[in-house]
């Protein structure tokens, strides 16, 4: 960081004019420079410019349905605890003990082959959190309620010690946090997306247990780009994606003051599904219109939440970068409560997951190969198809935040 006229400014490792080339309309824009996907110095700049100021999704409120339910998650090397407190509010607090920095929910003992591995994420139900190192104990709001053998320590007042709490917002059942105390609220900037998704009744849906993959070997933006663009489905997924062809892609206009990018693919028949039958495996959502039952919407609430929707369900991904070429990926389905009560729900869910596996079998190796290509000295800054218009929107969203950091406005 440098100081210019009293304002702290970030130094971007890539010239802004090079980044601006990617933020033009899709018919003029080019792919971001390779350093944006590979360079450690750029990753540190991006973490500061983007992730430290934006609303980051850390999961669903439905993952902590009961008082005392919790799970841990790490965002930008910050161990966090998501918990439902006694007032039934969802809170997100630091998972680092205020004594000497132990990760509170880390297991005290593990198999020998895991002794020096990073502590795993954990979940469960409790009335207090007790650090395994020295037994400092915190209530569900993060207040220190127990600290053994501290009676001889001068001016030690446990009532003044608590785990730092992050700003938290709930939107349609998703939990968001922000590391920036001055950031604008999220929900008011999602109005157009709310209207777009109104008939899906997302807030009333329930999530199944998410599946998390650590150390996914490609830059987080590659995951976002692959999920959002409609150019590849009719090519990479030819055959299994024919029911929703690329030519049916449509994107919402970019809104500078908005907080989401979204669009949909028009299907060739209603009630399609991501499985070999190309048909929905669950009953359709009753509140959808006939037109909506022929659409496959996809939504991005940057920087971390991706949502896909079908006529019978939704699915979500949370993308959290862990380095310039790695990220953690969590994913799960969302269903109306009535769907979860079907007697054969488990069998249908297994079939749905197996069907999505066919797409992952093509997407994930492709994304990994793109990462390898981005390391090349010949990495291209290619042009975009109209079926990738959302990628120029994503670039515009990113470059706006890069520029703010350089100008000292982030």
Image (cartoon, rainbow, N blue to C red):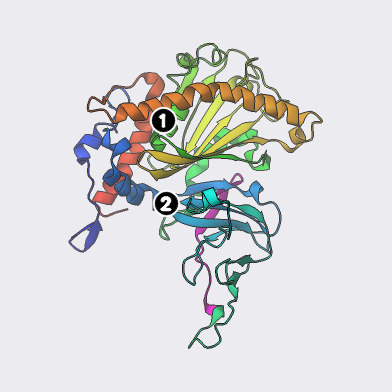
Q: Residue furthest left?
A: 5
Quadrant housing the N terminus: bottom left
Query: Which of the numbered marks, if any, corresponds to residue 49?
Result: none
Residue 408 percent coordinates (x, y): 26, 55
Task: Identify residue for label 1.
Answer: 225
Where does the magenta region start and end? 160-175
> For the residues marked 1 and 2, what is the alpha-carbon distance in whole angstroms?
21 Å
- Pair 1/2: label in front: 2
Image height check: is 359 above or below 161? above
Query: What kind of element bears circle 1?
Result: helix
Residue 47 percent coordinates (x, y): 35, 49
- Residue at 30% x, 37% y is 38
Residue 318 percent coordinates (x, y): 51, 41
Q: Quadrant of residue 69?
A: bottom right
- Residue at 41% x, 57% y is 180
- Residue at 45% x, 22% y is 230
Task: Identify residue for label 2.
Answer: 76
Q: Is residue 176 visible?
A: no
| 374 horizontally vs 154: left or right | left
Residue 103 percent coordinates (x, y): 51, 61
In the rendered image, residue 227 lying in the magenta stretch gets the answer no
Q: Is residue 189 visible?
A: yes
Nearer to me, 79 or 141: 79
Q: Earlier in the sequence, mark 1 or mark 2?
A: 2
């Amino acid at each position: 960081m440098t100081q210019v006229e009293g304002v702290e400014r970030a130094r971007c490792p890539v010239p802004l004019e090079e980044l601006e080339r990617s933020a033009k309309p899709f018919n003029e824009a080019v792919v971001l420079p390779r350093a944006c996907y590979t360079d450690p110095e750029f990753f540190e700049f991006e973490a500061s410019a983007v992730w430290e100021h934006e609303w980051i999704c850390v999961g669903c409120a439905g993952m902590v349905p009961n008082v005392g339910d919790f799970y841990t998650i790490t965002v930008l090397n910050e161990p966090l605890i998501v918990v439902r407190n006694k007032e039934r509010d969802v809170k997100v607090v630091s998972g680092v003990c205020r004594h000497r920095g132990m990760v509170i929910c880390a297991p005290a003992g593990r198999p020998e082959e895991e002794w020096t591995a990073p502590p795993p994420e954990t979940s469960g139900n409790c009335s207090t959190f007790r650090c395994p190192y020295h037994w400092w104990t915190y209530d569900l709001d993060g207040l220190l309620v127990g600290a053994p053998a501290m009676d001889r320590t001068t001016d030690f007042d446990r009532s003044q010690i608590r785990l730092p709490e992050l700003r938290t917002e709930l939107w349609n059942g998703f939990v968001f946090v922000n590391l920036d105390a001055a950031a604008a609220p999220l929900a008011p900037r999602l109005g157009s997306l709310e209207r777009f998704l109104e008939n899906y009744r997302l807030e009333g849906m329930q999530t199944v247990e998410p599946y998390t993959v650590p150390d996914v070997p490609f830059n987080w933006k590659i995951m976002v780009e692959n999920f959002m663009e409609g150019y590849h489905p009719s090519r990479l997924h030819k055959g299994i994606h024919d029911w929703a062809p690329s030519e049916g892609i449509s994107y919402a206009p970019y809104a500078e003051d908005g907080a989401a990018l979204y669009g949909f693919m028009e299907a060739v028949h209603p009630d399609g599904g991501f499985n070999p039958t190309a048909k929905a495996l669950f009953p359709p959502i009753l509140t959808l219109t006939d037109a909506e039952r022929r659409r496959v919407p996809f939504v991005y609430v940057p920087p971390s939440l991706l949502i896909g929707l079908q006529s019978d369900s939704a699915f979500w991904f949370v993308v959290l970068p862990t380095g310039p070429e790695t990220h953690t990926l969590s994913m799960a389905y969302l269903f109306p409560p009535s769907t979860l009560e079907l007697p054969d729900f488990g069998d249908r869910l297994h079939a749905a997951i197996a069907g999505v596996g066919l797409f992952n079998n093509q997407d994930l190796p492709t994304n990994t190969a793109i990462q390898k290509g981005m390391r090349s000295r010949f990495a291209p800054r290619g042009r975009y198809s109209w079926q990738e218009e959302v990628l120029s929107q994503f670039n515009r969203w990113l470059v706006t935040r890069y520029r703010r950091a350089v100008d000292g406005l982030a």
